[in-house]
Amino acid sequence: MIQLIVSVLLYFVIFFGIAFILNMLLRRTWLMSFLYPIIVVMIVDNISTWEYFTNPGEAFSTAIKRFTEITPVDITILLSGFAGTIVSGIVIKILRKSGYQMF
């Protein structure tokens, strides 16, 4: 149970930080929220991205199989990372409305 709490907090903070920095550098508020599903696929499928181009039939079937094997704990952890990207976008929006032009 402790590992779940630490993992949820860690994923939230890591993806909040990455999204916040990406938002500051590129000035695209929701970019990381759109890229997050790609990152989740890379985490879950455990397949080289190149295999999707060289052997797409086997790569997609393996990826779908691995996605069906995800436990509710894993889903919770991955959703906390997505929540971190969304909260980062909200914080950036609030900072921009408050007058911080660097964001």
Image (tube, rainbow, N blue to C red):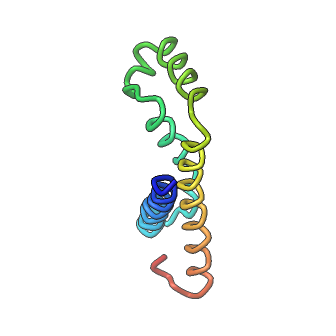
Measuring from the top left, give residue 88's x and y in whole percent.
54, 67
In the image, residue 38 above or below residue 92:
above
In the image, residue 57 above or below residue 22:
above
Q: Quadrant of residue 70?
A: top right
**Res 64 seen here:** yes
Measuring from the top left, give residue 79's x and y in whole percent.
59, 50
Q: Residue at x 43, y 65 (%)?
A: 17
Horizontally, residue 100 falls left or right of residue 68, namely left
Residue farthest toward the front in the current orientation of the protein: 1
**Res 32 seen here:** no
Measuring from the top left, give residue 26's x and y in whole percent.
45, 63
Measuring from the top left, give residue 58's x and y in whole percent.
48, 12
In the image, residue 68 above or below residue 95:
above
Q: Residue at x 56, y 81 (%)?
A: 95
The one nearer the camera, 18 or 11, is: 11
The one nearer the camera, 21 or 14, is: 14
